[in-house]
Amino acid sequence: MSACCDHDTPKSPPIGAYRRVLWVVLVINAAMFAVEIIAGVWGRSVALQADALDFLGDSATYAITLIVIGMSLRWRAGAAMLKGLAMTGFGCWVAGATIVHLMRGTVPDFAVMGSIGLLALVANVISAGLLFRHRDGDSNMRSVWLCSRNDAIANVAVIGAASGVWVSGAGWPDLAVAAVIAGLALSSGAQVILLARGELRTAAV
């Protein structure tokens, strides 16, 4: 994560190749949002619902990035700032939902959690692999990379939580993972906001 906070001169994105990659990951994320939100509600899993909303947020991120590709640093940094704020807002929502389900004592369906978590992991590993070569660009490009990387980490945690629910018969593993997802969103959102702020200052000079 620390590599995301350096202040090197931002690189210009290779527009053609990067645009094609973004379209692919946009389709993957939009499809996984639909699959995971249905499974999350059906399986009563906060972690799956949180991850589904993360897929939705990522889809919006990729769409915004496609719009600002090739524009000036000011526009790209502004888009990154919006995405950083969205990531932070998402983290706050997940934290709140986790508290609500903790109070209700919800126990999710571990089979649904595990199978959908594995499918989501495959989707995110593919996305992260496609975006890997673009991870060291400007704040806008880095925010896109952070989204996919964080999602892959969250999916591994969801699969682990499914095992925890199966063994314990309780809902706390699901809630623990939801809390981790919230923490990742808040941390990454803060990093993107700080980097975008620096680039906006540079663009204003």
Image (tube, rainbow, N blue to C red):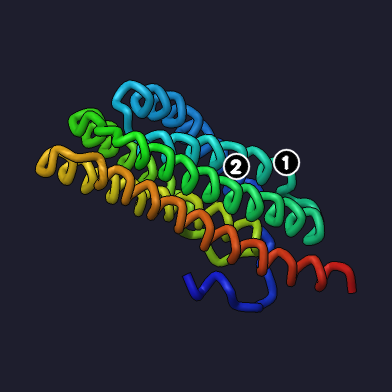
Q: Position of residue 97 (x, y in %)?
A: 46, 40
Residue flagged by tag 1: what amino acid is it?
A: Ile
Residue flagged by tag 2: what amino acid is it?
A: Tyr
In percent of the image, x 25 and y 33: which residue is there?
A: 107
Mark 1 closeness class: few <14, some 14–19, many ≥20 residues within 10 Å = few
Label 2's element? helix
Q: Position of residue 161 (x, y in %)?
A: 23, 45
Residue 24 seen from this side: no
Q: CA distance from mark 2 to mark 1?
A: 9 Å
174 vs 136: above or below: above
Residue marked by disc 2: 62
In percent of the image, x 49 and y 36: which residue is there?
A: 53
Q: Which mark is residue 126?
A: none
Lower sequence index among marks 2 and 1: 2
Q: Position of residue 115 (x, y in %)?
A: 23, 32
Is mark 2 in CB contact (under 8 Å) with mark 1?
no
In percent of the image, x 67 and y 68: which residue is there?
A: 194
**Quadrant (top left/top right/bottom left/bottom right) for the C terminus:** bottom right
In percent of the image, x 72 and y 41: which residue is there?
A: 67
* Foreground of the two, 121 or 106: 106
Outermost residue toward the bottom in this view: 7
Residue marked by disc 1: 67
29 vs 157: above or below: above
Q: Position of residue 93 (x, y in %)?
A: 53, 43
Location of residue 13 (image quadrant)? bottom right
Residue 187 seen from this side: yes
94 vs 56: above or below: below
Q: How many marks?
A: 2
